[in-house]
Amino acid sequence: MRSKVAWCAALAVLGAVTATSCSTAVPGHPHGAPSGSTSTRGSAITVGTMHVTLLDGMRYTEAASPGGLDGCVSATSVPCVAQLRDLRTASAGPQFTAPSGNRPYGWQTGTDAPRCVTPMAIPGAAATGSSVVERGFAPIGPKKAEYARFQVTCEDPAQNSEVRMWWLPTSKILVVEYASTPVLDAQLDQVLATATFG
């Protein structure tokens, strides 16, 4: 696992990169804007039946450009800190695997080979291993989500990281945080605490 000093250095290097790595920023609510747009700073966004308020400096990309990730939340210069995904439609398909803290790649919902996602690689090298290091339940607003933290190894060892996952099986909402650090953990926890549903 990379040291926190190395992650801070990596984030500093990315300081010149803008959050438009996922798409072009436009003002307004992402569901009222064209596909591929992002929200403005500090915006309230809607994902499925969940409404959250982003922190200043964060952006949400509903639909990413080819090779990117849909539902990305960027923070400062990191283009995809986390994904917030509405899986109601996907969960009805034959290729869907329900997220779970009881299996190694529990954040992975499809049949594609898992990829590593880090501040420097969206998506990155193939994941070569994943182990559950923590699991239980954690809040998303008033709800309790199935929660897990995974230690992920990658073909490129520089992309090894921890991944956190929240899964609401009734709402079919999945939240995945990539390249977990104490700072990013606190920021995402703060966003999820604002969640309301309906």
Image (spheres, grey):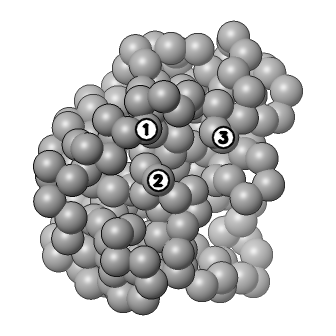
Type of amino acid at the residue the image marks with label 1: Leu
Query: Are the residues at dot 1 and dot 3 in contact (C-beta closer than 8 Å)?
Result: no
Identity of the residue furthest to the right in this view = 34
The location of residue 43, given as percent across then percent down, is 52, 15
Question: Does 103 sit above or below residue 140?
Answer: below
Q: Where is residue 36 in the image (x, y as percent from the top left)?
A: 78, 35
Of callouts 1 and 3, which one flags the residue occurring earlier in the amino acid sequence? 1
Determine the residue positioned at 21% across, 64% down.
2
Near mark 1 (Cα within 10 A), the count class, few <14, some 14-19 or many ≥20, is some
Residue indicated by mark 1:
14
Q: Is residue 81 above or below residue 57?
A: below
**Residue indicated by mark 2:** 120
Q: Mark 3 points at which residue?
A: 22
Q: Is residue 176 above or below residue 43?
A: below
Q: Which residue appears at 64% of the width and 39% of the height?
A: 21
Which residue is at 38% across, 39% downward?
13
Within 10 Å of disc 3 (Cα), the crowding (few <14, some 14-19, many 20+) is many
Identify the element where label 3 is drawn.
loop
- In this rendered view, identify the residue nearer to me: 94 or 198: 94
Q: Is mark 2 on a helix, strand or loop?
A: loop
> Is 138 located above or below residue 148 in the figure?
above
- Name the image quarter holding the C terminus: top right
Alpha-carbon span between mark 1 and mark 2: 8 Å
